[in-house]
Amino acid sequence: QVQLQESGPGLVKPSQTLSLTCTVSGGSVSSGGYSWSWVRQPPGKGLEWIGYIYYTGTTYYTPSLKSRVTISRDTSKGQFSLRLTSVTAADTAVYYCARGRQQLVRSSFYYYMDVWGIGTTVTVS
Amino acid sequence: DIQMTQSPSTLSASVGDRVTITCRASQRISSLLAWYQQKPGKAPNVLIYKASSLESGVPSRFSGSGSGTEFTLTISSLQPDDFATYYCQQYNSYPWTFGQGTKVEIK
């Protein structure tokens, strides 16, 4: 059974870089059929998808964060990572990593997030 | 971006009630919609994918319907464990977007 675990600093200073890692156990970030996402949730607010890395290494980022975000992977360690530069208080949130399960619909692949990490709180202050 | 709008934002109900939550997309998304349940301090948990497919291990009292721009999540008989916040999410096009959430409270 696949499990995901986020790790990284809980406190980041404004203008610095937020770096988080998601460790995948019971599965592989290079296995076909899956994408690997980051989602965040500011205190008391809703969910925001940040982006994903596909098993091939292809990435996609939400446009509002694209200029500041990098998602990468280390297949040898079974991990994928989030890097968010120039952070402000608005980036304070619980950050989740999640696996996307592939579906074939009308000859195209789509992904819904079926396994999530427990989340890690990052405060920018 | 596709905007997802849920209604109501808050719902008060009793154990045993039938509960329906609506999610509307600003553009057609076919059936590429998922529903998640989130409890305080916990990660979201997928209930429904592809608008109406029940995720493995999810109780059958949860069901989803709809396509295009209008979708519903129904809980046929509300149980104590179901008091939580529910989110819809479209995965038809990038960026993936969530509804603002519906909190189901005890009446």
Image: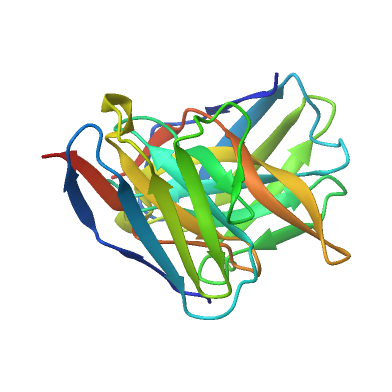
Residue beneath the point at 59% across and 67% down? B95
Residue beneath the point at 22% across and 32% down? B15
In the rendered image, the quadrant that contains the C terminus of chain A is top left
Direction from residue B94 to residue B88 in the image, left or right: left
Residue A5 percent across, percent down from the top left: 57, 25
Residue beneath the point at 18% across and 41% down? B105
Residue A17 in sight in this render: no
Direction from residue A35 to residue A64 in the image, left or right: left
The residue positioned farthest toward the bottom in the image shown: B27
Q: Nearer the viewer, residue B13 or A72?
A: B13
Q: Nearer the viewer, residue B14 or B2?
A: B14
Residue B53 percent across, percent down from the top left: 63, 46
Q: Nearer the viewer, residue A20 or B1?
A: B1
Relative height, residue B64 to residue B59 (above, below): below
Residue beneath the point at 46% across and 56% down? B88
Residue A91 percent across, percent down from the top left: 38, 53
In the rendered image, the quadrant that contains the N terminus of chain A is top right
Relative height, residue A2 to residue A102 (above, below): above
Q: How many marks?
A: 0
